[in-house]
Amino acid sequence: MHTYKHMNLIHIKLGNIHSQHDELNLTGSILNTMSDENEIDWALLPSDVIVHVFSFLNTRDLNHAARVCRTWNEAFAHPTLWQTFEAWFFLPSHISYIEGAKKYGKYMKKVFIGVNQMLTHNRQNACALLEILSRIERRRLTYLKIAFTGENPLFYSGQEFLDGLIILFSKVSDNLEAPLTTLQHVDLSGLAVPIDDRVIDALSENHRGLKYLDIQNKVIISKTTSDCILRLVERCRNLTDLRLYYCSISNEVLEAFTDDNRADVEHISIICRREVKFGYEIETEAWEDLTERVPTLRVTLGFDHTCPYPLIAAILKPVIPVRTLKLETFAICHEEVNLAAVLYSKTLEKLVLQTRNSLELEAALIKVARSCTLLRSLLVYCVVRQETIDEIFRLHPDMQERGTYILKTEVEPEPWVVGVEEGD
């Protein structure tokens, strides 16, 4: 069954490639001369064509396709096919991903690990994969993303994942050949356990070519200190995209981004939560110095329902080049929307609101649409009147054409789909 299914899948892929790439005329001629699908000798396909078609398959489908014939199985081991690797740990049988990493890990550049952390065997298999990746000689890994898909077990701290990441980020043995310090893109936003300084310090100490780091992982408490982030910025001189919580940033961190002997930071994303009330305010001068050093800086500011409401206006400084603003407070916030229309009229491109509907809010939305000429996306998770929607679309017809909006006149079950309005 799997063999027949994947033969059909490859047939479709080949047809698509033939229509898009003239250089694959050989493939088209092979298929066109075969009137009956049952007469196709799939082993006659050139190996480079098979590898190219296989590159469109995910890891699971690739594994099934490799069982069709010996020729396809030989193509299965081509280094190109293992540069991107996805491992999903939901069942005990998914341990097969570990065997793939053992054989072909030396080719992997981009790795994604998805795991239902509720079950013990899934956690064990995922951590075993991290250990295997850490022991690969001539490691080429540049991209790592981990995402939990289930619910954490009761009182679960995720210590085995933190330990596994420390091992992966560190040099395991002097016997392993360089290069090992290759990571450039690390996304831990899906790792639903508190990330502490040990993990980030191991990353920044051993992977100084890091360019992207996301630790906005939606845990209740952030354990990453601003001192640790300062060390990260000082060590990783190529870091251009940093996404973290307000409690993990400081004036000193922003100052470190102004050093001359480093790449210009392109994007900083800051989510403000309950910890804001225990921290200190980032000074206007720190933002001014950074924006003067990097005029093209983009900033994302987000506020969730736990952020102390009176502090939102204090954090929204006019000197911050806010491109994306997220007010996910589930409370009345029309005053903050009005403030954003004034402060960020020249920079705001995207506004996300999870709030309560009111006439004041709709007036504020129209004010944003009029003032913010760069506005490209408006996601509003409460109902608004049709006349308000019509006015926003009149001011920004391109937003309606692109479908980069959520504007609805009636309450619908979640999830609300971007670009789909009531009546579309």
Image: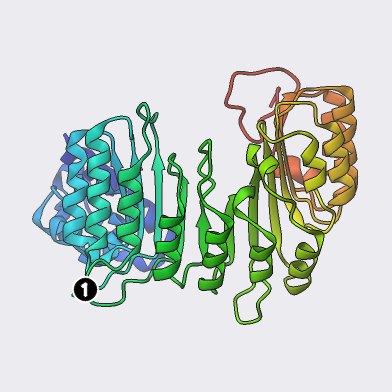
The amino acid type found where label 1 is placed reads Leu
Quadrant placement of the C terminus: top right
Vertical placement of residue 74 versus 309, above or below: below
Task: Give the residue displayed 26% in from the left and 37% down from the top.
Answer: 122
Task: Give the residue displayed 34% in from the left and 54% down from the top.
Answer: 165
* Side of 113 where 394 appears, left or right: right
Let me know if residue 134 appears in the view: yes
Vertical placement of residue 241 versus 276, above or below: below
Number of marks in the rendered image? 1
Dividing the picture into quarters, in which one does residue 287 lie? bottom right
Determine the residue located farthest toward the left in the rendered image. Answer: 70
Q: Nearer the viewer, residue 18 or 258?
A: 258
Q: Nearer the viewer, residue 181 or 157?
A: 157
Callout 1: SS: loop
* Side of 359 where 101 appears, left or right: left
Vertical placement of residue 423 versus 137, above or below: above
Let me know if residue 403 appears in the view: no
Q: Nearer the viewer, residue 64 or 299?
A: 299
The residue under label 1 is 176
Dividing the picture into quarters, in which one does residue 384 lie? top right
x, y percent for residue 288: 80, 66
